Structures are given as C-alpha cells and as structure tokens.
Amino acid sequence: MTQLSTASAGVSLRAVLAEELRGNHAPNVRATSCTSDWRQLRPGDVFVALADAEDDGHDHAAEATERGASAVICERPLPVFDVPQFVVPDTRIAYGRLCQALVGNPSRQIKVIGVTGTHGKSTVARLLASIFHTAGRSAGTLDSFGYWDGDEDRPASGTALCPPVLARSLAQMSAVGATYAVVELSSRELIQQVLAGVSLDAVCVTHVGRRHLGWHGSVENYRHAKRRIFQYMHPDAVAILNADDPTSVAMLGELNQPALTFGMRLPAEISAEIIEQHINEQLFVLSAGDDSVGVRTSFIGDHHVYNCLAAAAMALAYGVDLPEIARGLEAVDRLPGRMERVMCGQDFAVLVDAADSPDALRVCLRAARRAMSGRVICVYGSHDECDQTQFPAAGRVIGAMADAAVVTHGYPSDGFHGTCMELRAGFADPRKAQVVVDRTEAIAWALDEARASDTVVIAGMGDRVHTPAEMDGELINDCEIVRQILRGRRTPMSHVRLAA
C-alpha cells in the first residue's frame, strides 16, 4: 500500500520538507494525501517519485500530473509544468516525513521502539509487548507476525514495511491509547528510509551476522545498513545491544546515547544462566545487577534465552521490575513458526521453524540436539526470498548437525531441481540428503523415518503458507501439514525423489 490520506486540513509541504528543500522556491502547497504509485493516484494527491531497481517514479511524473497530482516531489527537475515541483536530495526521506506529518506525527505522542538484527526481531518484539502487558502498560507491535495494537490483531501482509503502513499503524496505536509501539525493522527497510519522520525512543539490536549479502553486496554494507537505525534515535533514547556479538559491541563504541548490554558469555548488565533444557521447556535464571529471577519458558534453545534477555533489558530500561518481566516472558506460549511444537500423540518431537540461513539453521538444530536424546531429522526447503548464495553453506550445516535430512523447497518451480542440488552439494556426504520434490512428501518422509525420542525439525518456511502439489491451490503451512499427516487426514503420495 503506497497511498496515504488524512481527513484533516492537511500539512504545508514547505514546512514538512524545510530541511530538504535547500533553497527551492516552489510555492506552498497544502497536502492532504500522497502516493508513490502514479497508478493509484487520485486527484489532489501529492506524487512522490521513488526509484528502485525495477522502476523510477521520475519517469511517471507526467502520468501523475495528468491524473490530477497537486504537486510532485522529486530528486531532479522534471519536464512537468502544470504543478509545483519540490526538488529534494532524497525522496524516500521526504516521503516518510510527509506520511508521518499527514497522520499527526504519532511518534511524538507514543514511545516508538525499533528492533533490528539478523535474527530474533519478531520474537523480541512480541516478548517485549507481553512484558508491557503484564506490567499493566499498553503496547502495540508491527512485525513479521503482523500488526497488533493491544486490541486488533492483523496478520502480516507479506510485503515489506513502507512509510504509509508505518504511519497508519503508529497513528492507530496512538488513537487506541497505546503507550509503546514496538516496530521490527529489516536492513532493507532501513536502507529504504522507512523510518524517516519517526523519532525512536529506544533501539534494540539482537545480533548482527551474515544475511542478505546478495542484496547488500558485502558483509560491511549489511552491517552499515543495520547501523542506520541509530540515526533515528531521540537524543535521550536508550540502545540495547548484545555483549556477546562483536559487531554489536563495535556499535556500542560509536554511540553517544545511554546503552544497556545483555549476554551469557561475556560481562553484561543483564545476563542469564540456563539451568535445564527439555524438548517442552527450559529454565534459566535472569540476572540484573544483584537481582535475579527464575524464568520457565516453553521455548527451547540458547537463542530464545538471548531473545528473552533483549526484551528484558528493554523492559528494565522502562522501569519494569524483574518479577513482572519474568511473568511477561512466561506468558508467551506460542510464536508461529518459531521452534513451534506440533503434538498429535506421537512418541517423537516435531519442531517447525523459520530458520532459512546457515546461522539460523545452526542455532535451530543445536537446540533440538540438546533437548532430545534421539536422532535429529531435518527437512529443509526455503521460500523464494531466501539468499540462494547461502544454499551450499546451509547444506553443510544440515549435513554436519542432522542425523538424517531431506531437501525440498517451499514453492516448487522450474528452478526447484537446481535449488535442491545446490543444497545437497553442501553435504560432506551427499548420500545423506534425500531429495523429495513435493514439500508434503518431504515432511511425510521425515515423519515416517522418526522413531521414539527422535526430533523432526522442519525448517525454512516457519508459518509461511504454501500450496502442496496435490492440493489444487489450497494454502497451508508446515504445522498444519504435519497435523494432517499424523492424524491420518492426508494420505501422502508415494515418495518420488529427484535423480541425483
């Protein structure tokens, strides 16, 4: 959704864009709505020309004016003479600021908390919202699970966050009385200036690894993208950083704002010690200074403890005490597609996880290995947005950490065979990787292979829906496929494997 409108009297473009105009003498225009898509433009909209890899909005300024644009915001003078032009250095920044201004700049009314990192963003956002709720404070979230304002819960749209959606969401949270808004931010969204016009009251960086290198070009570019979140911090904002992550520690040295650190291996203000880990739960002691509290959570793995630490550190920064933090962490009993257990009376464990990168797979499989005494059987196939350059590395991780594996795909397509072969090539012993065309068949193979005390890990898709080959368009996720197979409501086809 690229269009935003308001029922108010509008805002002055010259006032909103004062920092960007740089001597531009365009006449003042009162904007009541804007869009970056000339095809959606309605008479009176301000048209913002954005450029990306696929299209350049500057090339469509004429069409926008023909449709009734009241003004054009652009990065270079255009041969459009019927409406005022506002030339700015970066139209993405201008777009974000205009969207926020049109809804009354809600980040001035509520405390906006930004969460970024390679892994754990959505989980930290939901854990933090749960802590606030337990402490009697109202918080909304905008993350890959969807939108929640404490009352309304909408599923994720499946598209990247954009300025109009962010502006509307923050305005709605403010309107229903939320005190806090926890927003998940990817590196791509930070590069695209989605936060322009927003003042962050706090920032959390979960961990910075290697991710989206095909899009960013290099590890350093990716890390620089993550650092961009600090540009939007209010002068008094607090930063929450991972003391066990070298990149986060380096960021700590660059900050002028107050900061809190969390970790389990190196000294940190908020730390944890794991006491017990089982397939159904784990117990750890959460410590802050001289105070400590036990936390029993239904999620397993060191990575979940780190996510709990990040959320706890943020909550402590806002004055929530440790007992309330523990209750808030324990209140979260399900995170769709995040080490989600599927139980249908079987004598082995089934975990569905969104892990789609080598690092995430390593964390996921390590947690499964530590929690159970039997074999680990891994089903892996990712979504189309996954970084395919990391497939061989993903195969190496699975080959080293799983006792048995089946390679499949999230959305079978013409390139399916090549994708599976890239994954299989990473295995030290390719014979260890079964290759099954249909994802349902791959899951059925793993479930049939499992014995008592084994753990089946189905990774790569999490709660994303897909269409099994035999279902004629029905959208379904991995958890539901497992349930239908285990309950006998779905009879798998014969296991047809691709040739090696």
Image (tube, helix red, strand yellow):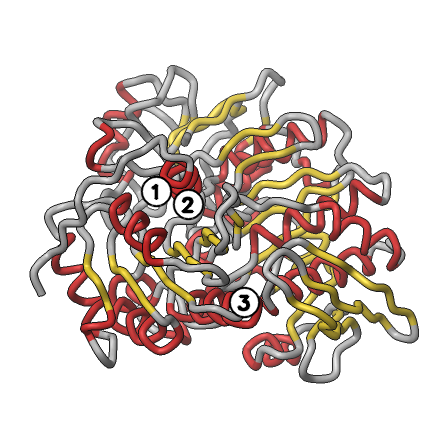
Position in image of residue 39 (x %, y %): 28, 24
Residue underneath mark 1: 50
Q: How would you rate the neighbour count of disc 3 (Cα within 10 Å): few for under 14, some for 14-19, many for 20 or more? A: some
Give the Cα separation between the discs numbered 3 and 1: 51 Å
Image quarter in which the N terminus is found? top left
Residue lying at the far right of the rendered structure: 290
In the rendered structure, which disc, 2 or 3, sits on the residue that comes first in sequence? 2
In the image, 369 versus 328, the foreground residue is: 369
Amino acid type assigned to the residue bearing label 1 in the image: Leu
In the image, 30 versus 345, the foreground residue is: 345
Residue underneath mark 3: 372
Amino acid type assigned to the residue bearing label 3 in the image: Met
In the image, 290 versus 179, the foreground residue is: 290
The residue at the point 27 percent across, 40 percent down is 58
The residue at the point 79 percent across, 69 percent down is 285
Whether label 1 touches label 2, CB < 8 Å = yes
Residue underneath mark 2: 91
Observer-side mark, 2 or 3, equals 3
Asked which secondary structure carries label 2, the reply is: helix
